[in-house]
Image (tube, rainbow, N blue to C red):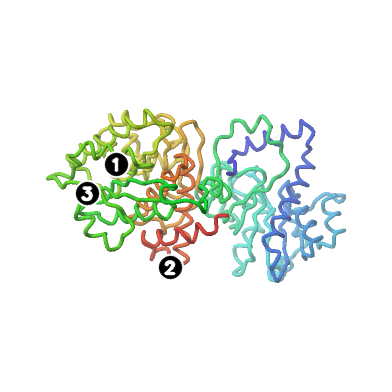
């Protein structure tokens, strides 16, 4: 996972490294070469290796010049457009020119003629204008160039150095002239403002460049926020040996579905299977089974009793035996909140809590009406095993903690972290840039935001994914991180398949899970 830092934390890291003998100049060389290496690797088969670099006067401009020098040596044709004049004996400029690069300058470019010609002639645009230390609103030549860029219709594929120019890397605020990147390559760590709105809308895909900072630096120790990425998902997913059977991958027990919401059981159950669970048992009403049996032949069913105000499971011994034999348990999707359902909820929580006292870790996931029952009966928080996974959207979170949704949205990561610690649970605060918080203080942000996920049933799919991963033995926090990332990427994949986010329904997200899983190496 990528570390996420404030601007001050990043400065502290660089200052400590410099004091220990790793100079700022050496960091820049590492950063620029790493930047160039990643660009060359991604676009090595591109037919047009031409790049226009927008070079500011600060460190980001220096990184860009080093990267372009590297790319020149790999056969690229690059042009540096200097936003401000650099020193006459600037070693980075001279080395770049010696490599065969071309320099243009804003102060000699009347009417942006050279700039516009460069935009037309190059396949890639490297944004190295401004870095993390800027103050908004922007002024001067940088803003003039950026504002002019917004007037152009055809803009090359844009790669940002460390951050898109024009965003506040702490608050996430943006200048009207801020550049929109297709790909942002962050130096050493992701800057926290990039994972806030509206800045996130400018970042595109996020990757990390190693600039050579020692991982033993003291300044790293207080950094507890991370950005999820695919290599971490790959590490978290369980191995699947050839010599295995369904018992190798656990049993997910899912309490889901009711007369009004039968589809919740299908979406959560199938998602658990898609994550790799060996067996999925649905505990629900006969009417739900009758509605879904044909569409969900893989499910094993445990039928509950329909009551005047919900449902029940009166055979306590059978209930305890099935709970005991389950590797992970999900309660809540499409469940309802009737009095009889509440009593079943209490009974099941009591059974699980007793089982958990004798085990090494939690296996419980609460979603949807499981959370609503909890918020209406807060004393039940004392019956939630430590480490359980709670998956609220902002409205459910507001009811759980007594805050307003708007307050939660203002400080999503901080709120999730606070209540994960307080309740001793893994908390998944859903929404654009989903936050996963561990009770020990670690917080992971999922860098995905798409309206394709804003659909009834989308949360059922996420809950099923997390439960299915936990059934396979993935610890709750890692299962929540991996499940939330897969869910987010499945939303993006479904949007591509359907051609329009508005057309995506929860079943499309479910169907897109294999498209995501097959690309996790």
Tag in front: 3 or 2: 3
Label 2, label 1: how many angstroms apart (C-alpha)? 40 Å
Callout 1 crowding tier (Cα within 10 Å): few <14, some 14–19, many ≥20: few
Residue position marked by numbered label 1 in the rendering? 322
Q: Quadrant of the N terminus?
A: top right
Q: Is residue 301 above or below residue 475?
A: below
Q: Is residue 422 above or below residue 86?
A: above
Label 1, label 3: how many angstroms apart (C-alpha)? 12 Å
Please tell me the numbered disc located at residue 347: none
The disc, 3 or 2, on the residue closer to the chain's N-terminal end is: 3
Quarter residue 340 falls in:
top left
Residue position marked by numbered label 3 in the rendering? 303
Helix, strand or loop under label 1: helix
The disc, 2 or 1, on the residue closer to the chain's N-terminal end is: 1
Q: Nearer the viewer, residue 358 or 14?
A: 358
The disc, 1 or 3, on the residue closer to the chain's N-terminal end is: 3
Residue at 72% x, 32% y is: 16
Helix, strand or loop under label 2: helix
Q: Are marks 3 and 2 in contact (CB under 8 Å)?
A: no
Q: Position of residue 38 (x, y in %)?
A: 69, 55
Figure disc tally: 3
Q: Position of residue 334 (x, y in %)?
A: 27, 50
Helix, strand or loop under label 3: strand
Q: Nearer the viewer, residue 321 or 100?
A: 321
Residue at 72% x, 51% y is: 34
Q: Nearer the viewer, residue 340 or 222?
A: 340
Label 3, label 2: how many angstroms apart (C-alpha)? 36 Å
Residue at 36% x, 39% y is: 364
Q: Position of residue 181 (x, y in %)?
A: 60, 57
Question: Seen in the image, is 378 located left or right of residue 183?
Answer: left
Question: Seen in the image, is 261 located left or right of residue 416?
Answer: left
């Amino acid at each position: 996972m990528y570390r996420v830092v404030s601007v001050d934390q990043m400065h502290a890291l660089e200052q400590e490294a410099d004091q220990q003998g790793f100079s700022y100049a050496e960091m820049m060389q590492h950063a620029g070469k790493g930047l160039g290496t990643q660009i060359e690797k991604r676009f090595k088969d591109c037919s047009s290796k031409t790049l226009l670099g927008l070079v500011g006067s600060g460190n980001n401009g220096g990184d860009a010049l080093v990267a372009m020098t590297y790319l020149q040596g790999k056969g690229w044709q690059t042009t540096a457009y200097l936003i401000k004049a650099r020193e006459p004996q600037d070693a980075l400029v001279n080395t770049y020119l010696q490599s065969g690069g071309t320099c243009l300058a804003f102060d000699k470019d009347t009417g942006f003629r050279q700039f516009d010609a460069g935009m037309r002639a190059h396949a890639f645009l490297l944004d190295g204008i401004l870095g993390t230390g800027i103050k908004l609103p922007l002024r001067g030549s940088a803003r003039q160039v950026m504002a002019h860029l917004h007037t152009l219709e055809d803009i090359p594929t844009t790669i940002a150095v460390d951050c898109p120019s024009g965003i506040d890397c702490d608050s996430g605020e943006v200048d009207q002239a801020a550049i929109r990147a297709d790909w942002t390559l962050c130096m050493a760590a992701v800057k926290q403002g990039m994972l806030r709105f509206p800045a996130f809308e400018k970042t595109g895909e996020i990757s990390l460049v190693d600039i050579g900072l020692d991982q033993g630096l003291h300044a790293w120790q207080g950094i507890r926020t991370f950005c999820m990425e695919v290599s971490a998902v790959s590490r978290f997913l369980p191995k699947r040996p050839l010599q295995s059977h369904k018992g190798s991958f656990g049993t997910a027990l899912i309490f889901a579905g009711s007369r009004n919401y039968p589809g919740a059981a299908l979406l959560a159950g199938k998602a658990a299977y898609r994550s790799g669970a060996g067996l999925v048992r649905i505990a629900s009403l006969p009417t739900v089974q009758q509605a879904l049996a044909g569409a969900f032949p893989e499910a094993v069913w445990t039928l509950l009793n329909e009551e005047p105000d919900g449902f029940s499971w009166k055979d306590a011994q059978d209930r305890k035996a099935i709970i005991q034999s389950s590797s992970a348990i999900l309660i809540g999707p499409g469940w309802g909140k009737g009095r009889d359902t509440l009593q079943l909820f209490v009974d099941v929580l009591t059974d699980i809590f007793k089982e958990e006292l004798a085990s090494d870790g939690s296996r419980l996931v609460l979603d949807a009406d499981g959370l609503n029952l909890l918020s209406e009966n807060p004393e039940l928080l004392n019956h939630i095993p430590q480490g359980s996974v709670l998956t609220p959207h902002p409205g459910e979170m507001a009811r759980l903690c007594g805050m307003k949704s708007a307050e939660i949205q203002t400080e999503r990561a901080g709120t999730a972290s606070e209540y994960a610690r307080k309740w001793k649970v893994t908390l998944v605060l859903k929404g654009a840039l989903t936050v996963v918080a561990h009770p020990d203080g670690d917080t992971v942000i999922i860098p995905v935001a798409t309206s394709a996920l804003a659909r009834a049933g989308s949360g059922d799919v996420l809950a099923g994914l997390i439960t299915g991963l936990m059934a396979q033995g993935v610890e709750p926090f890692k299962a929540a991180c991996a499940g939330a990332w897969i869910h987010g990427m499945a939303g993006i994949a479904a949007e591509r398949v359907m051609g329009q986010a508005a057309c995506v329904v929860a079943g499309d997200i479910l169907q897109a899970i294999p498209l995501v899983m097959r690309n996790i190496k």
